[in-house]
Amino acid sequence: MGRLGVTEILVILAIVLLLFGGRKIPELMKGLGSGIKEFKNAAKDGQPADKKEEEIK
């Protein structure tokens, strides 16, 4: 499987636009961004206690 070129990316974006419409895309991106932020926060909170104590010092 090779890399995605410009044409492939444009086709994918056109399909997404047709499926969801222009109004839904900002909502989807906002949800995706908040989901990534939550995942990063959860991953940071899941560090072992030794590392947390070293960061505090």
Image: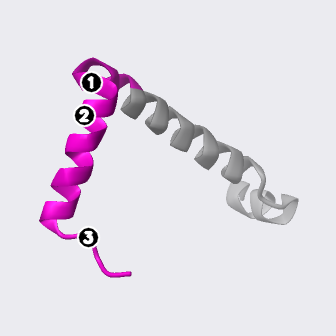
For residue 34, above or below residue 45? above
The answer to whether the residue labelled 2 contacts the one labelled 1, judged by CB atoms less than 8 Å apart, is yes
Q: Residue furthest bottom?
A: 2
Q: Residues within 10 Å of mark 2 (few under 14, many from 20)?
A: some
Q: What is the x, y in percent for residue 55?
A: 69, 59
In the image, taking residue 54 as reference, residue 1 lies left or right, namely left
Q: Which residue is mark 3?
A: 4
Q: Residue furthest top?
A: 23
Judged by its main secondary structure, the magenta piece is: helix
Secondary structure beneath label 1: helix
Q: What is the x, y in percent for residue 46?
A: 78, 53
Inspect the image, locate mark 3, and give the three-letter code of the amino acid beneath it: Leu
Q: Which portion, as a residue range, is magenta?
A: 1-27
Q: CA distance from mark 2 to mark 3?
A: 18 Å
Which of the image's four quarters has the N terminus? bottom left
Which of the image's four quarters has the C terminus? bottom right
Q: Nearer the viewer, residue 24 or 15?
A: 15
Q: Which residue is mark 2?
A: 17
